[in-house]
Amino acid sequence: MNILLIGATSAIAKAVSRLYAERNARLFLIARNEARLKVLADDLTVRGAQSVDFHVMDLADTENHANAVSNAKSALENIDLALICHGSLPDQETCESDFEQAAQEIKVNGLSVISLCTEISKLLKEKKSGTIAVITSVAGDRGRQSNFIYGASKSMVSTYLQGLRGKLLPHDVHILDIRPGLVDSPMTAGLEKGVLWSSPESIATKIVNSIDKKKHTVYVPGYWRIIMATVRSIPEVLFKRMKF
């Protein structure tokens, strides 16, 4: 299997890449930190990956996305699976008072993902096979006071993926929207943890299983589907007063 991992040095992406390395997959990694990519590439080789190549770039630099995806195709020959994992967790208060900061976070968490999907879709549509899997978030299900800039970005991506899924169906290209809940990772290091938090490794196992089963939209862990269904059911007259 030939796999493109974008945002490869994130905690979830690393855990997923290790599972695919054990399946002797060919991997192409994209992230912005070269030193971390080299360490990860060595680790995946030891774990059984058939080959590991990487490309260094800032994923907010959308002008270079076409070149990065082209490099991945050249290294892998064909892309069977593209998993997009990058993102940032913005400071909500800062984004509310500074539009430029809000725009940057929306670009990182939303527009850059759509840009990458656009480039990858062209290749898979031509090949008439493959899977694009994107890590979004349960935060995109409803605009909460505490993180609606982040949530708006993720919601935009989920809506885009839903349309893309239908558009690419005649070309046998599968689209998977992965919506994690609370994940204990470096991105959330400053947040207080509780019983609803999950490890990147447990999330990775569910992601790989969902890709294998060609699921469409998955909440990981699964109990987040029930939690978010409850959140979505709250009437707006009440929801707007809730501070969570």
Image (cartoon, rainbow, N blue to C red):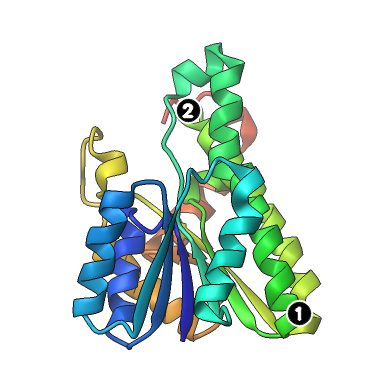
**For mark 1, what is the residue?**
126
Name the kind of residue labelled 2 in the image. Met
Q: Is residue 71 above or below residue 191?
A: below
Say the numbered circle drawn on residue 212: none
In percent of width and height, residue 52 lies at: 36, 74
Q: CA distance from mark 2 to mark 1?
A: 47 Å
In percent of width and height, residue 85 lies at: 45, 56
- The residue depicted at 21 percent of the width and 51 percent of the height is 195
Q: Is residue 160 above or below residue 204?
A: above
In which quadrant will I find the C terminus? top left
Q: Secondary structure at mark 1?
A: helix
Label 1 environment density (alpha carbons within 10 Å; few <14, some 14–19, many ≥20): few
- The residue depicted at 56 percent of the width and 29 percent of the height is 104
Toward the top, the furthest residue is 97
Q: Is residue 234 above or below residue 230?
A: above
Say whether residue 46 is left or right of residue 96: left
Viewer can see residue 229:
yes
- The residue depicted at 27 percent of the width and 59 percent of the height is 38
Q: Which label sits in the foreground, 2 or 1? A: 1
> Which of 240/134 is in front?
134
**For mark 2, what is the residue?**
242
In percent of width and height, residue 93 lies at: 46, 17
Quadrant of the image occupied by residue 118: bottom right
